[in-house]
Image (cartoon, coloured by chain):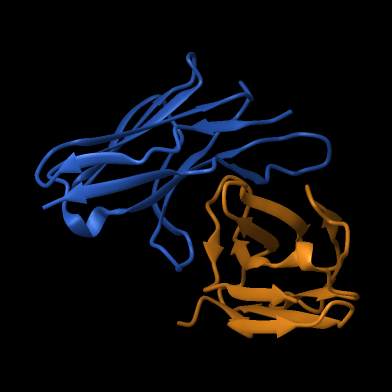
Chain colours: A orange, B blue
């Protein structure tokens, strides 16, 4: 049982480049989330998808877009990467409200 | 502003001692509470959840909840060096259209000295 799978694990981008972070879960969870984690800032919600077919902005959505491709997959796209987007990105999912999240292993992104 | 507050630490305890980690939250209507452990360079891992006032025990871990004081804590008995990690408190909060997303504290770094 793989849980939540994120790819890639590491990525270096040049300013202005674009990329998509992939996330897939095999637990049949309804809700999926994208967080970024920065030193001293904690986990901050970028976007979430409460159910298949819906997406909503979180606390820090600027510079990002998301796609809930199906119930399993939720991708995060950086259209024009900036050094301020250097961070560790975590995807998470949960079965329903009031349950905890299961996190993926993370993507460490550096924008130079 | 919905907030979850934790002491950033570091909290240092000797091996075998009890480690006490504390968390306060701002939303009186919150219903579910979680503790995550995060080792350096790894992703957060759910270790405890609690929904009702009182204590909930699981092995060496005890979660304590006091909704009237808006306070949740995690006790780790017989602390081991392998417990050294950052512990994140998370609370389900309803605000705007958030549909009960988890709000995370910034975490308390625990160091258990042999």
Query: Residue at the location (81% across, 79% down)?
Result: A69
Indicate whether B38 appears above or below A79. Answer: above
Residue A87 appears left or right of A83: left
Q: Residue A46: x and y, percent?
A: 76, 57
| Closer to us: B51 or B26 | B26
Q: Position of residue A35 (x, y in %)?
A: 67, 59
Q: Tell me which residue sits at (45%, 23%) in the image.
A: B71
Q: Nearer the viewer, residue B36 or A108?
A: A108
Q: Name the residue rendered at 38%, 61% in the picture.
A: B39
Residue A14, by quadrant, is bottom right
Q: How many marks?
A: 0
The foreground one among A25 and A110 is: A110
Res A83 visible: yes
Outermost residue on the front side: it is A112
Q: Residue at x 54, y 40 (%)?
A: B105
**From this viewpoint, which residue is outermost toward the top?**
B68
Residue nearest the observer in this picture, A95 or A33: A33
Q: Position of residue A59 (x, y in %)?
A: 78, 47
For this view, does A42 lie left or right of residue B110? Answer: right
Picture quarter with the N terminus of chain B: top right
| Residue B8 located left or right of residue B29 | left
Q: Position of residue A61 (x, y in %)?
A: 84, 56
Confirm whether residue A7 shows in the render. Answer: no
Q: For residue B57, what is the image quadrant?
A: top left
- Compared to residue A106, the image places residue B83 above or below, namely above
């Amino acid at each position: 049982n793989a849980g939540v799978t994120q790819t890639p694990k590491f990525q270096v981008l040049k300013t202005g480049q674009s990329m998509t972070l992939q996330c897939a879960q095999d637990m049949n969870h309804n809700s999926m989330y994208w967080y970024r984690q920065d030193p001293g800032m904690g986990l901050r919600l970028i976007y979430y998808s409460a159910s298949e077919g819906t997406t909503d902005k979180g606390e820090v959505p600027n510079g990002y877009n998301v796609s809930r491709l199906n119930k399993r997959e939720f991708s995060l796209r950086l259209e024009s990467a900036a050094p301020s987007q250097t961070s560790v990105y975590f995807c998470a999912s949960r079965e329903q409200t009031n349950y905890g999240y299961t996190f993926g292993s993370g993507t460490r992104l550096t924008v130079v | 502003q919905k907030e979850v507050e934790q002491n950033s630490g570091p909290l240092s305890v000797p091996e075998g001692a009890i480690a006490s980690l504390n968390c306060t939250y701002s939303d009186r209507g919150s219903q579910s509470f979680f503790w995550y452990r995060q080792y350096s360079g790894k992703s957060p891992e759910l270790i405890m959840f609690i929904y009702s006032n009182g204590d909930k025990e699981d092995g060496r871990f005890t979660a304590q909840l006091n909704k009237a004081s808006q306070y949740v804590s995690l006790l780790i008995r017989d602390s081991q060096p392998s417990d050294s990690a950052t512990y994140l408190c998370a609370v389900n909060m309803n605000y705007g259209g958030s549909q009960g997303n988890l709000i995370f504290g910034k975490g308390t770094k625990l160091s258990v000295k042999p």
